[in-house]
Image (spheres, rainbow, N blue to C red):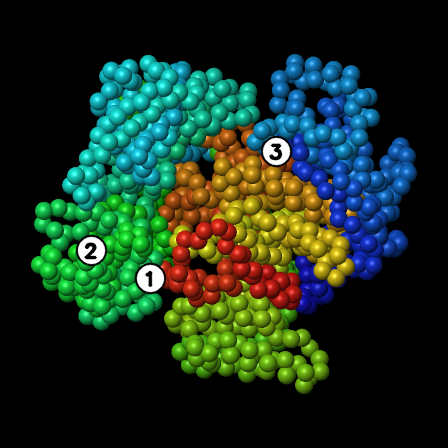
Amino acid sequence: MAYRGGGRGGRGGGGDRDRGDQRPPYSGGGGGSHSFVWPPPPSTPRPVPVPYKVPMGYRAPMLLPHQAAYGVPAAVYRAPAPAGPPVSFSPAPRAVAVTIRAPPPSASAAPPAPRQLAQGAPTRASEPAPASSAPSAAALAKEVEKKLFVSETALAPPAAAAEAAVAAAQGAAASDAEDASGVDLAPVSKKGLAHPARPGIGTVGKSVRIRANHFLVDVADNNLFHYDVAINPESKSRATNREVLNELIKLHGKTLLGGKLPAYDGRKSLYTAGSLPFDSEEFVVTLVDPEKKEKERAEREYKITIRIAGRTDMYHLHQFLRGRQRDMPQETIQVLDVVLRESPSWNYVTVSRSFFSTTFGHRGDIGEGLECWRGYYQSLRPTQMGLSLNIDISATSFFKPVTVIKFVEEFLSIRDTSRPLSDRDRVKIKKALRGVRIETNHQQDQIRRYKITGVTPMPMSQLIFPVDEKGTRQTVLQYFWEKYNCRLKYGSWPCLQAGSDSRPVYLPMEVCKIVEGQRYSKKLNDRQVTNILRATCKRPQEREQSIRDMVLHNNYVEDKFAQEFGIKVCNDLVSVEARVLPPPLLKYHDSGREKTCAPSVGQWNMINKKMINGGTIDNWTCLNFSRMRPEEVQRFCMDLTHMCNATGMNVNPCPFVEVKSAAPNHIENALRDVHRRATQMVAQQGTGNQLQLLIVILPEVSGSYGKIKRVCETEIGIVSQCCLPKHASRPNKQYLENVALKINVKVGGRNTVLERAFVRNGIPFVSEVPTIIFGADVTHPPPGEDSASSIAAVVASMDWPEITKYRGLVSAQPHRQEIIEDLFTVSKDPQKGHNVNGGMIRELLIAFRRKTNRRPERIIFYRDGVSEGQFSHVLLHEMDAIRKACASLEEGYLPPVTFVVVQKRHHTRLFPEVHGRRDMTDKSGNILPGTVVDQRICHPTEFDFYLCSHAGIQGTSRPTHYHVLYDENHFTADGLQSLTNNLCYTYARCTRAVSVVPPAYYAHLAAFRARYYVEGESSDGGSTPGSSGQAVAREGPVEVRQLPKIKDNVKDVMFYC
């Protein structure tokens, strides 16, 4: 792509590689694209990199803040000048199996020796020249040791550290002589890599006080006892288990249980404050079972065995909360959490960590047989201020307690119930109702309950089954008339099936009613989501009041379980010290009237501004699948190209090939026809590019977007911009402006950059050395789709120091697997037989080198979508992959990495101290964009913070939680908070600061785009099943369906925007 003029210093034309006049003066030379070989070319035999495992719990030794783990001055990072000899990297030595061990803690604070750098890089005069340009495998192993080592004394008190240093000094000589292939040492933390400690509290920004929906919890210093519970016969239902245990407490609580009031998790664990009078005991209770049909089995005997499993006290929890212990005493917190959940578990419907009830307010109809119930979320969390109870209001979807006939009518929007159901409708119903509990009403003397397992393939007027041992067969219609004197009306509809396939129970839909209080866990369609949001969306002041009311309603002071365990919950939201970070200055093109822009309250506009790098589009056309008239389409295209040119792009006003309209049922043929016509035109002209942009006006009926993107991006290699007909037929200026922003980045341009990017060391931790910023996310199929693959996406910045262009890669992986499999891969070359290194990290590092002619010397990795329980698992595997990807490119290449988890799915909400004050809130009444919190409600010892980077639009803003799991770049609190906030202003698709750091946001968009490639129609948000229509629970792993390959010309730009 060519570019129109540039920013400061006369940014000229030319593509990404022709950048001599665009690069800030401090960047150093770079040479042409021919001057590097990275990794070595195929002619150089390259063995697999030395295999190693990331030692769990090791972290790089602390050096100067910006030197990271290199031990060399910043000048060493600069690439050699263009005039120098071509850069080449030494081939790796023969692969040797090496086990990386932890070195002993060093007595001295001397930094490690600098890494072997590329040929031509300067070294310090005081250092001897290296003996060989190709270090041995053992030398590389030692380098990795240094890189990943964290001394066991890092978490110990000073006295222990001093003793360890003496011991290390005494044993240093012996350990140095050991071979690198020795025995692995035990990791520092049994949970994996040690997370970095908080580097201090941030100071940048204007101080403000806000409130958070956290409530301080005080716990008496009790001894807590844990007992294993075994109930025979076993039940999978927590409700049944609770009933059994409740019966036991009624019978023996005052006597055999010693007057203790235990808390029970509904499964296998029972907790008491103080011990029970026994270590192991068996009990027998009899319980009436309402769901059993046979009267003689209505009473059931249960044998309960209670056995001591362990005990804990509050000492380790207090030590952890005071920052004197790094490992979180998870079991102690879990005990207290179970205690506080005991009362609501009896009174409300429990869904994960939330409780729902019709007593919490009006149940709203959200369509298709579903309704919305209100409730609250509750979670006990360790924080800097002590234990905190996080409480938030919530809502979710439930089945309406109506007859199944009524549900089917609403779910399928059926008006004529006399017509039989189609196979497609039958599959939809089967999928929606599988596992749902119903009760029958055709027997006057009793109500029976069943769980639906399926829907019969034929209507009940034709469904014949044996009714007695003689083999007499009847239809369901006949059976119900003769047995129950019940005349069924819906003979053309299928039956519900309960029981097993070998012993099915057929139930006509009209005699069944859905039992109240069952959550609908499958994916909601767009209309249902809109309805649920409309019912629950509350402004900050209203939401805060709802939370206060909920806490008062829960009345923790009177909770008998809280009293038993000595737990007191404060009724007031906690007040927190926060800071509002200043917005960054944004740079636009010098030819515009406004060359820089200072955002106001998280937003700005393009008036009097031009994109800093406007893309050039010579060849474009439009394809219309809507009912818009040709003249309307022509006018829309003219308005859009005019807006693109007005905002700084260079777009040919005339389409390359004729603008055409096509029917929505011929989408693929129409797209291929456009591609064929454009290719013929290029061939006739003999010069020029292929079609650079296809504008697509979508059909009025949804369902085509996924197919269009799949064909364009994976089959014919065209960048496309889809527009809805309701917007294209009446485009306003704001809409055209936003579409122009998206088009510009899709053709390789830039919209804006941080103004500080053009100042020497202007962006801390980014400008000093070539830095690559990654974003990664995994998107999982919706509930109920139990065979579809999960999709991982990784994006990485391709420009430095601007950090605005991100290349995206996607990959399919096993169902619901959170760890990204394809970060680094090793496969066998089928022809040559040797190992070939690959993977997304490696490909993106090579792409960065090609674009900037520099290798990344710092990696910042924003990882989205990881829950707290997966932190250590994801970190261990993904850090290992990043390390291996780097080491596979060059000997000793181990750039320092900072690994940050980005979390949006949490329930912390922040409220202004005074609602309605102009200087404390935005237009929506939310806290100001840039508000950051790293005190009181954050982790007791680790490096995390909440950042609300965006201005609210409606409802209450949700801050994003950033948690640093690994940090070799030694970020300060201000450094990472400011960088993250500033990046939120560089999002390409709008002139607003966004709520999630853009690399993570882009990874999310790329992953969702890739799901369209494999799901097509069903990704439009409907509640229809997948293309197969059959979500059968499968045994064993399902084969991963690989994604179609994205064309290279599409992959080179931000196609997912």
Q: Residues within 10 Å of mark 3 (few under 14, many from 20)?
A: many
Q: Which residue is mark 3?
A: 193
Q: Mark 3: which amino acid?
A: Leu
Question: What element does badge 1 sit on?
Answer: helix
Which label belongs to residue 428?
Answer: 1
Residue occupying the point 50% across, 75% down = 668
Above or below, 544 against 229 in this view is: below
Foreground: disc 1 or disc 3: 1
Residue occupying the point 52% across, 81% down = 659
Foreground: disc 3 or disc 2: 2
Residue occupying the point 47% across, 65% down = 1016
Nearer to us in this view, 757 or 190: 190
Question: Which numbered disc, 1 or 3, marks the residue that appears first in the sequence?
Answer: 3
Question: What element does badge 3 sit on?
Answer: loop
Which label belongs to residue 469?
Answer: 2
Question: In x, y percent, where is residue 434?
Answer: 32, 54
Question: Which numbered disc, 2 or 1, marks the residue that appears first in the sequence?
Answer: 1
Where, by quadrant of the figure, is residue 258 drawn? top left
